[in-house]
Amino acid sequence: MNKLKLAYETRKGKAYHGNSLELLDSLKDNSINLVMTSPPFDLLRQKSYGNLNGDAYIEWLSEFARKIKEKLTEDGSFVLDLGGAYQKGVPVRNLYNYKVLIKFVEELGFFLAEEFFWYNSSKLPSPIEWVNKRKIRAKDSVNTVWWFSKTEHPKSDVRNVLVPYSDRMQKLLKDGKKYYDPKARPSGHNISEGFNKDNGGAIPSNLLQIPNSESNSKYLKYCKTTGVKGHPARFPAKLPEFFIKFLTEPDDIVLDIFGGSNTTGEVAENLERQWIYCDLEKEFVGTSVFRFAQNEEQAKILHEKIINGEYVDLRDNTLV
């Protein structure tokens, strides 16, 4: 097994190559504000980036969660993105993501602050057998995203992730008297005269509608020009962006223990948060630096250095 190694640093972050369990052991207790990650899922078909199945998967993931709980600040959060899956050979769902949820809460002592659902409208129909061929199931387009916390009152501010008002609400803000009467509704809601106050946006729901349709990013461009394969399971930047804005403040520390292409680190850097990345695969670490390269030539040099085991210093965004 590869020994943990610092691969590169940027102005706000550090990227490590190696086992995340070793990285977690090296971190101070109560020091991480947010762990935002998407591990390999419990899938029947083996993926190039590795995955386990069944109870073995849940125990494997729990080993990381136990250490994460120690490293989180008292008001810190652990956000875990898990895709759905089917049982082998039958059109019946695998409950692994719900088993993870229950185990983390009932056995490991996390709180479920809130459950989120990421709807990826651009996801291809799957599984092929039940959806495309036999046509007996609908397309699976939603991931469960569990927001765990160390205490019942984690740091959070929904005002940082407000969404644009609907057309109807915008009309109401312009002329409230024309569109509603302040009074109690049959539902029990008391609609006051202040209902049409402009708060800068609407409170988001826990259904995050974010297409994962990246095609022309700098990351993919440099993968192509360098002649290397990008990470096959990247989540879109808007997913970590939502939780980083929602659950942290500038200079807080964000950790991704299954870093992959380092979308989390790039978003954190842009939002002035400190970040820590780790991945077991050297090639994924090598391509993740593309997110911080200034141009194609630099991207190739940085990738080669990391693949050769050299440390890269990008703290002043120049080559060393």
Image (spheres, grey):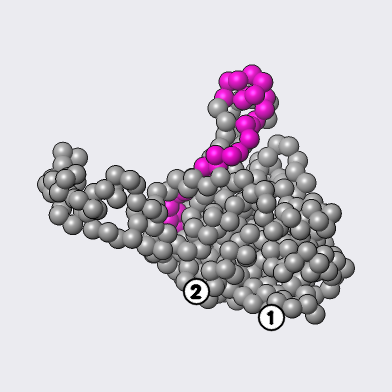
Residue 102 visible to the viewer: no
Q: Residue furthest top?
A: 134
Image coords of residue 168 (percent x, y): 29, 44
Where, quadrant-wise, is the N terminus in this rendering? bottom right
Q: Amino acid at mark 2?
A: Pro
Residue highlighted by disc 1: 316
- Cβ–Cβ under 8 Å for marks 1 and 2: no
Residue 161, percent from left and from top: 42, 59
Q: Is residue 127 magenta?
A: yes
Estimate the x, y position of residue 187 in percent, counting from the top left. 19, 40
252 vs 187, left or right, is right
Q: Which residue has dot 2 on it?
A: 250
Q: Nearer the viewer, mark 1 or mark 2?
A: 1
The stretch in magenta equals 111-137
Q: Element type at marker 2?
A: loop
- Residue at position x 61%, y 61% from top? 264
